[in-house]
Amino acid sequence: LVGSLSSTYFESSVEENDEGRNKPSIDNNNNVVHSSNEENDEDNSTIDPKAEALRELICQIRSDDDVFRQFALLERNDGAVIETIHELGILKDSLLSTNELVDILSYDSDGGTDPSLPFAHEIQVFRRLQRPPGHVFVANGSVCDISCDAFLCPASISKKKDTVAGTIWRRWYEALRDSNAELMKLLRGTDDCISGTSSQGRPGGRRQRSRSRSNSAGSDSDAERGSSNGSGRNRGLFSSIPMKHYDEYDRVCSPKHWPWAEFWRKDEFEAALGGLFRTPFIVAGEVGIDRSSRNGSKQAVPSEQDHIQSLLETVRQFVQVSLEELRREQPRPRANRERYLLALPVVGTGFGQAGDITGQIVESMIVCLSELVSAEDDVDCVIVCADLATFSHAQNVRKSMLDELSTKSFESSHFDFVEPLSSFRLFTAEMKAQALELAKLSTKGLLSLFIGAGVPMGAGLPSWRQLLLAIEDHFTPSGLPEERMLGKSVDPLLVADWLDVLCKSREDRVAVKAGIKERIAKFLMERSGYPSLLMYLLASLPTRSIVTQNYDSQIEKAFACRNVAEKKGVAEVGDEAAAAESLSVIPYRPVRGAERWLLKMHGCISQPESIVVTSDDYRTYENGRKKALGGLVQANLLTSHLLFVGFGLEDPNYRKILKEVRKAMGKSQ
């Protein structure tokens, strides 16, 4: 929320252009009004009376933020719905009685509505009010390097040659080839032990068109063919990965041999194939210019609106294909999220040749994605902007949309209007005011971040307790949770002490002897592939100082991926040179003159010996390193507003820090 509302203080370098935007307008009475179309010119006299009454009820709920919030956060049972409606008195002026509403909702009691009912659509819209709407986030970074369930890779797709071309696709391919050879082998279809990676042969799966063995198993030199577009730039054609094409979705494709089963087995038992870590599902989406006009004839250059509509169709197909694949193959979202997270770049602004209308594309994507996430129960989306200008413009677009729809009422004829960014209505006025105040402090350089373990947990990394339990699993017979002994202790520090003794005195079940710090560093390095969404949002804030007790390198990676378009490509994971341009890591990689600094108080996985984990480590820290770093922390506390993110209120580290903060600031403050 802080990141989204800070748009008030961003200045966009991209001019706003509302031409051709298909959006609702607000009349003089603050009513939402749509442009006329055949569907909305319905004669109200033909509507069933109960359907009309239910429409009025829906509009009444949607017109009041407090009522809307209560309904969205209700338990999903009709008893709670009826009780809330009765308490709020919103049936007082309605043509519906409580009993009639109960009868209407009973038609949907089995989870489905008979489409032949005269009020079937109204029931569906009413049910939509009973769940929190999905959200469209905006972040600054690299779409290839964010922890999500699936991401859209803009490309030029040739079904005939079964090839995919594009800068982002090429960068993703090269990074995967260099860092995860086992996964690349599976994607090429050259492994004899692929199980459950294709919908062909799976119960309920449709038969997909296949490609020849000679293409899928070719060598790197044959597979990675470069070609040039009209401007002579290398777009990188890669045919070594067989692609899965969809009959009903003509603008997207995905790897045919995506190893869902191997990823799932790793999540269950933390024992994956060598070098194989879970990677976001990639969907290639067509962004090339479609030269066919709406009447079927060819045209030299399509209009801007036709081009934008083609790009939006790619966006819609990406969301639908991703959800279909994820729901079937990956029943749970990654990193214990409530919803699947889909990441998209601003499409068509590179080789899609629509860079001159970036502002219109950004605005259209926000409206389109808002509609898509509002229509589904289980998905959020994030638009990942590759440069500061686009990021600032996207923030300003969202802010203007929120201002436009901040005070409104709904006509019953437009009861099913999908309101953009309705998720912001879940926040109270007090919460929004506090976020706005934090945004002001941030842009003035007066906000400092203290990042806890909860932030990288959004990328699948463990909490401190979970990390220690994972180390204990190295010494149990098969690594299963029920075999743990030390994990039953209440005090994590006591667990760390016992594990330290265990690591020093014994080999693990695969005959490896290593200290607890080396094991922690190795464990986190293997699993810290991509920064979490929350880490990206925090890195997007204009703060100058960050303090953390985390060992991982998620913060550094998120900063390395900022403004990747200005760095002439997708930021490589672990690109320390890129991170050093804007972030000084103290005390491990200090950069003189850096615009921002990160203080890692309890060590870093790049230097395992620096990790503070046992009682002896804390005693040494108190007497040594803390004194050296304490002055910097105290100065930061006294000159800025400190925002804690990712801490539990009962976290002993948090309580200890809070005590030191109060001591440093004095009783009067």
Image: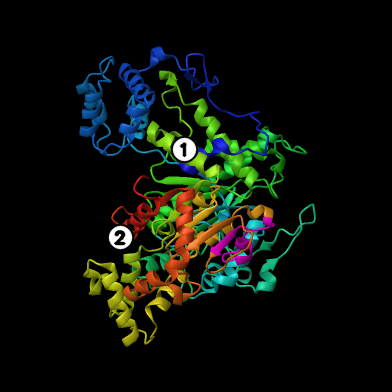
Q: What element carries label 2?
A: helix
Task: Write the start and end of the magenta stretch as one range.
Answer: 567-585
Q: Nearer the viewer, residue 547 or 636?
A: 636
Q: Name the residue under label 2.
A: 652
Q: Nearer the viewer, residue 501 or 312?
A: 501
Left or right, residue 152 beside residue 149? right
Packing grade of label 1 (10 A; few <14, some 14-19, many >=20) is some
The first of marks 2 and 1 along the sequence is: 1
Taking 607 as reference, is 61 above or below it? Answer: above
Q: Is residue 496 visible?
A: yes
Taking 664 as reference, is 527 above or below it? Answer: below
Packing grade of label 2 (10 A; few <14, some 14-19, many >=20) is few
Q: What residue type is labelled 1?
A: Glu
In x, y percent, where is residue 547? 46, 58
Q: What element carries label 1?
A: helix
In x, y percent, where is residue 367? 53, 35
Q: Which amino acid does label 2 sit on?
A: Pro
Residue for point 35% across, 71% down: 618
In x, y percent, where is residue 186? 51, 70
Left or right, residue 477 beside residue 316? left
Residue for point 33% across, 22% down: 57
Taking 222 as reference, is 637 above or below it? Answer: above
Quadrant for the N terminus, please.
top left
* Mark number, residue 437: 1
